[in-house]
């Protein structure tokens, strides 16, 4: 089963080709340089850039995989959450490709894609506990059966990756902040500066990172001479500590031995090292599959197709859904039957 997967949820134009669980190619064209001059992602610019790039990126992904379009068995794209103009470009392109060639189209939730990337290395399907930590989300899911995502906790404010990005700005480091803070942290001392432990007293499974980010801002304002490597190391240790402690506690309470760690922040080496100490059975994404990419969307679609978790007739009726939470309600933002019969 060869699947072409597309993700254009934010500022990366990404197309990947997979054969079942094997990634054949994964082309990601980052728009980071374009948006850097605005100090953040400019939605209109992002959609225009996706429009200009999508066909070329898809063509490159096929060439790098050594696959002809005629060999593709299914097409998949992210339908949400994300920037709606950006989502529409990938979704429209994928639907057109599938419809034109008579192939099944699978609409994939962005976070389900991240999770599929972390599962690709092994045979695990369920049950497991899953931490998704990215630039837009930090959520804990309990997955009792394949595809059944039950949210058990998450960030009350900033996502973990967002906190890395904001602290990077405070430290004068480049976007995306995760890799730049992580590499500076290697030269710093944990607890070399005082920073609070987030949500220390809670009994639930939530996270909070905005107070920590504010503490970094206040620290730098009051103490401009602070060693920024120590700030990076201590900040990273607080985020990692929080992610690992809450996940470990949830796994113990719920009774899960397998823990899936997904999303861009899963690329963080300190996070991986801290999870390694827990004795849990861990499922991390392979290098290159942690941050946004098209292969993860193709992997999620391939898993669905293999286990029959698909909508009869495909997902051509699915709309872009900028805010759709994973596991809450149907995967289709609008009832396709209603759409098809004009009842929407
Ligand atoms: O999953 P992703 O590519 O995009 C979203 O869906 O948001 O995640 C991007 C986020 C960014 O905030 C980035 O700073 C963070 O993941 N990130 C990292 C690392 N690599 C990327 N955070 C910490 N350490 C890293 N090595
Ligand atoms: Zn993502």
Image (tube, helix red, strand yellow):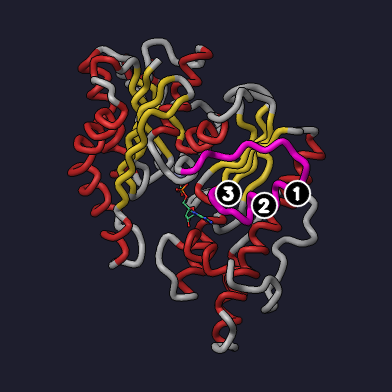
212 in relation to 92, above or below: below
Q: Disc 3 to disc 1, how far (Cα)? A: 21 Å
Disc 1 secondary structure class: loop
Question: Which residues are the magenta region?
Answer: 267-287
For the residue labelled by badge 3, is the local secondary structure a helix, a strand or a loop?
strand
Residue 124 lies, with reference to residue 223, above or below; the image says: above
Assess whether mark 1 and mark 2 are in contact (beta carbons under 8 angstroms): yes
Residue 145 vs residue 308: left or right?
Answer: right
Q: Residue at x 59, y 84 (%)?
A: 226
Give x and y (percent) for residue 276: 71, 46
**Which residue carries the number 2 mark?**
273
Residue 274 among those drawn in magenta: yes
Q: Is residue 277 left or right of residue 95?
A: right
Q: Which residue is mark 1?
A: 277
The label nearer to you, 3 versus 1, is 1
Question: In the image, residue 36 lies at what x, y percent?
Answer: 32, 64
> Which of the image's four quarters has the N terminus?
top left
Q: Which mark is residue 138?
A: 3
Q: Position of residue 107 (x, y in %)?
A: 39, 26
Classify residue 342 by image quadrant: top left
Question: Cα distance, mark 2 to mark 3?
Answer: 19 Å
- Marks 3 and 1, the one that precedes in the sequence: 3
Residue lying at the far left in this picture: please name it. 52
Is tag 2's residue or tag 3's residue first in the polypeptide sequence? 3
Q: Name the residue rendered at 41%, 33% in the picture.
A: 295
Report the number of numbered marks: 3
Task: Check if residue 227 falls in the magenta segment.
Answer: no
Q: Residues within 10 Å of mark 1 (few under 14, many from 20)?
A: few
Alpha carbons under labels 2 and 1: distance apart: 7 Å
Asked whether the viewer can see residue 211, the reply is no
Name the foreground residue: 326 vs 298.
298
**Residue under the point 52% across and 64% down:** 183
């Amino acid at each position: 089963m060869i699947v072409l997967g597309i993700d254009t949820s934010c500022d990366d134009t990404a197309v990947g080709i997979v054969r079942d669980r094997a990634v054949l190619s994964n082309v990601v064209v980052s728009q980071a340089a374009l948006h850097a001059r605005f100090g953040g992602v400019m939605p209109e610019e992002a959609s225009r850039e996706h429009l200009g790039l999508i066909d070329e990126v898809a063509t490159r992904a096929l060439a790098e995989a050594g696959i002809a379009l005629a060999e593709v068995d299914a097409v998949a794209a992210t339908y949400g959450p994300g920037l709606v103009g950006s989502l529409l470009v990938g979704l429209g392109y994928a639907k057109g490709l599938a419809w034109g060639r008579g192939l099944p189209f699978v609409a994939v939730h962005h976070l389900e894609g991240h999770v599929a990337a972390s599962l690709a290395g092994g045979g695990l399907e369920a049950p497991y506990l899953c931490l998704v930590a990215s630039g837009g989300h930090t959520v804990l899911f309990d997955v009792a059966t394949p595809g059944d995502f039950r949210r058990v906790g998450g960030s009350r404010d900033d996502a973990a990756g967002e906190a890395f990005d904001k602290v990077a700005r405070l430290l004068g480091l480049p976007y995306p902040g995760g890799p730049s803070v992580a590499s500076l942290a290697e030269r710093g001392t944990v607890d070399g500066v005082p920073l609070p432990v987030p949500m220390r007293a809670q009994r639930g499974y939530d996270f909070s990172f905005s107070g920590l980010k504010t503490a970094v801002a206040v620290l730098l304002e009051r103490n401009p001479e602070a060693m920024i490597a120590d700030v990076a190391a201590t900040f990273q240790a607080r985020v990692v500590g929080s992610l690992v402690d809450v996940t470990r506690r949830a796994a113990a309470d719920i009774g899960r031995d397998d823990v899936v760690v997904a999303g861009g922040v899963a690329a963080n080496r300190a996070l991986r090292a801290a999870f390694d100490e827990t004795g849990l059975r861990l499922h991390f994404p392979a290098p290159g599959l942690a941050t946004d990419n098209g292969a993860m969307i193709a992997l999620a679609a391939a898993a669905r197709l293999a286990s029959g978790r698909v909508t009869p007739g495909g997902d051509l009726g699915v709309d872009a859904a900028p805010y759709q939470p994973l596991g809450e309600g149907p995967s289709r933002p609008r009832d396709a039957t209603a759409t098809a019969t004009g009842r929407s």
